[in-house]
Image: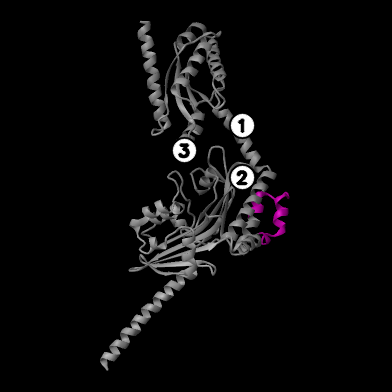
Amino acid sequence: MLIFLFILTFVLISLLFYIVRIIKLTKLIYNTARKDSNVIIWKNSRILYCDKPLMELLKKHGIDVNDFRNFSFEKINFYINKYPFLKEFFEKFRVNFEEKLFEYETTIFLSNEFYKIKFRREKNKTTVYSVLLITNVILNIKEYTDELISSIYKIPEEFFNLTTSDTSTYELVDYFFNFLSSQNIIDSLVVGIRKIDGSINIIYGKIGDKKFKNFTIKDKTLISYISDTGEKLYVNNSEELKLPEEYKLMKVINKPYSIYGIPLRIGENVFGAVLFEKEGNNKFCLKDFHLFEILAFLISISIKLKNEYQILYKSSKENFKKSIIDPLTKAYNRNYLSIVLYKNFEISKEKSKYKIVIFLDLDNFKSLNDKYGHVYGDKVLKNFVKTAKMVLRKDDIIIRYGGDEFLILLYDLNIENAESVIQRIRKMILNSEFKVDFSYGLMYFDHEKSLEENIKIVDKKMYEMKSKKKKLNL
């Protein structure tokens, strides 16, 4: 009898564990799946379940399901090399391998068919369950189209009328927020415009119980990142967001939330961004994205029609232009160097079109000033820049670095051609009314170094030439 009770107890406990496992798997699939998705499930590194349609689908596209029967961290490089179209997924999977929960969603194009892929991986103390779901978007195109169209029908007609009315952009966005929050779609909304100095003017912000209007943020934030990149961004968990070092997420609420960021643009010119946010993880779906993009477009139109963007941008641009142009020579000044070039050079060194840097100093300029006066000296400087611009191309840059020192940046040239450019400038100036010779340093940009370091090196080369000239004159 005791033996029977012991066996019965063991069977019941085993059954209970099995039921718990089934509940976990069911919950996992319920949180992730669509009824029309093909599914594969792993327990730890072993395949627990793979439906037949998915096996046929993988085989159709040259994916060997046997490669994934013993799924492991060590195999990630193998997967990337064999299946390069899944590289992004595997790289993110590697980074998040030790996380308790990892979710990934994307759309890929294979053999003229679009597939929506969703992956979810959960860890508990002893077990890891992973679920991969694949949906053929083309086969379900009517459902996806209906989702997109339904998002348009959600927008009240008055929104389109308000966009072209005399309602301010702030009031328009407030209407949008009240509508979306009443539908329980979002609980926060932020709209920011990038100013000419790189700071962000928050023209509307509603986060929790806090409201913002015409609030300037000088730090590089998520809105700055979206404005700078010009790319949409979906963050399904704000706690897991990793931005480049110079940017940071400005947290007003200390809870995880979902974010969909969209750049604001007029034509090709991106001038700001809007953030749609909701507390919790992975709160937005495809039709929400479509709805947000329509509203972001209406916000952009509103700003354009009401001249808020033109007033802010054009007046700032005029002032900015004055601040970066040397009033005497009309060359760029050091403000241009620090405001524009340092920023562009440091953010995208590998994309920089400027290959050659030249540092140049007029010889015996002080003596010319002392002998003929400052008015004559000013004419020498203006003549030098005017002559240099006649030789330089449209995209080449000349900067008055200080006094009689100039910095020239040449794009897409080698050293020999750059040397030829300098000699043509020298020849034209020595044959002009305001003759002056100069010393210079010339080198390729070293993109492993900062712009400032490059300038120091080429400045040293210039002084070496100047020293040699002095020795010859002696």
Q: Which residue is more in the foreground, 199 or 359? A: 359
In the rendered structure, which amino acid carries the disc numbered 1?
A: Glu
The residue depicted at 45 percent of the width and 54 percent of the height is: 86
Q: CA distance from mark 1 to mark 2?
A: 20 Å
Q: Residue furthest bottom?
A: 1
In the rendered structure, which amino acid carries the disc numbered 2?
A: Arg
Q: Kindly identify which numbered label has been placed on residue 318.
A: 1
Number of numbered markers: 3
User: Dot 2: what SS?
Assistant: strand
Visible residue check, residue 103:
yes
The residue depicted at 42 percent of the width and 29 percent of the height is: 445
Q: Which residues are magenta?
A: 152-173
The residue depicted at 42 percent of the width and 54 percent of the height is: 92
Q: Which residue is more in the foreground, 278 or 102? A: 102
Q: List the residue tagged with mark 3.
A: 348
Q: Nearer the viewer, mark 1 or mark 3?
A: 3
Task: In the rendered view, tell whether residue 314 sits above or below residue 276.
Answer: above
Q: Which residue is more in the foreground, 239 or 373? A: 239
Q: Nearer the viewer, mark 3 or mark 2?
A: 3
Q: Callout 1 environment at 10 Å: few (<14), some (14 to 19), or many (20+)?
A: few
